[in-house]
Image (spheres, helix red, strand yellow):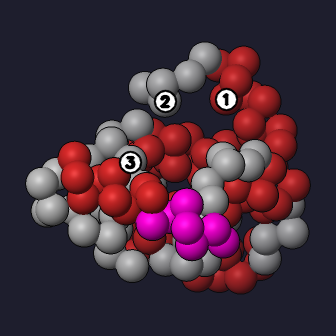
Amino acid sequence: MFHLRRVVFDFLLSRIAPAFANANVTKAMNSSGSSIPAISRLGVTLRWLAGGSYLDLCFAWGISTSTFYHENGVLWPTVEALDREFSIGFPFGDEGRLEELAAGFREHSDGILNGCVMAVDGFGVAT
C-alpha cells in the first residue's frame, strides 16, 4: 500500500512526528472536531506518492479535500517534514545541473518535456 515495510514506516514516523507535535490542537478542534495525527499525515502522503487518489484517501482517512492540498494541510507539510529529515540529493541551486537534467528530458521526449527536471511516477507539476 505504501511501497515500504512497516518498520520503515515506523522509522519515518518517528523522524517526522516532532514536526507536528506543536500543531494548534485547539484551532483544529474548533474547525473540524479533531487534529490530524502524524501517523495519518504520513500514511496519506505515502499512499498518495505511491499512486493513490487524493479523493479516495480523503474519504478513507476522513480528511476534507480542501485540507489535503492546502499549504498548511496534510500533503505539503508532510512532504516538507520528510524533506527536512532526508536529503534526496536534488540539485535545487545548481542551474548548470538543472539544465543538464532538462536537456535529458527534452531529448528523451523528442522536445515535448521542455524545462522538465524531475518526474514522479506520472505526476507533473508546473512551476
Q: Mark 3 or mark 2, which has the lower sequence index?
A: 2
Residue to which mark 3 is pinned: 120
Q: Mark 2 or mark 1, which has the lower sequence index?
A: 2
Q: Which residue is drawn at 63% across and 68% down?
A: 94
The answer to whether 16 appears left or right of 34 in the picture is right
Disc 1 is placed on an element classified as helix
Disc 2 is placed on an element classified as loop
Q: In which quarter of the image is residue 24?
A: bottom right
Residue to which mark 2 is pinned: 2
Distance from the alpha carbon under mark 2 to that under mark 1? 8 Å
Q: In which quarter of the image is residue 14?
A: top right
Q: Which residue is drawn at 23% across and 52% down?
A: 107
Foreground label between 3 and 2: 3
Identity, as a three-letter code, of the amino acid under mark 2: Phe
Contact check, label 2 and label 1, Cβ < 8 Å: yes
Foreground label between 1 and 3: 3
The answer to whether 63 appears left or right of 40 in the picture is left
Q: Residues within 10 Å of mark 2 (few under 14, many from 20)?
A: some
Residue to which mark 1 is pinned: 9
Which span of residues is magenta-colored?
A: 93-99
120 shown above or below 13? below
Disc 3 is placed on an element classified as loop
Identity, as a three-letter code, of the amino acid under mark 1: Phe
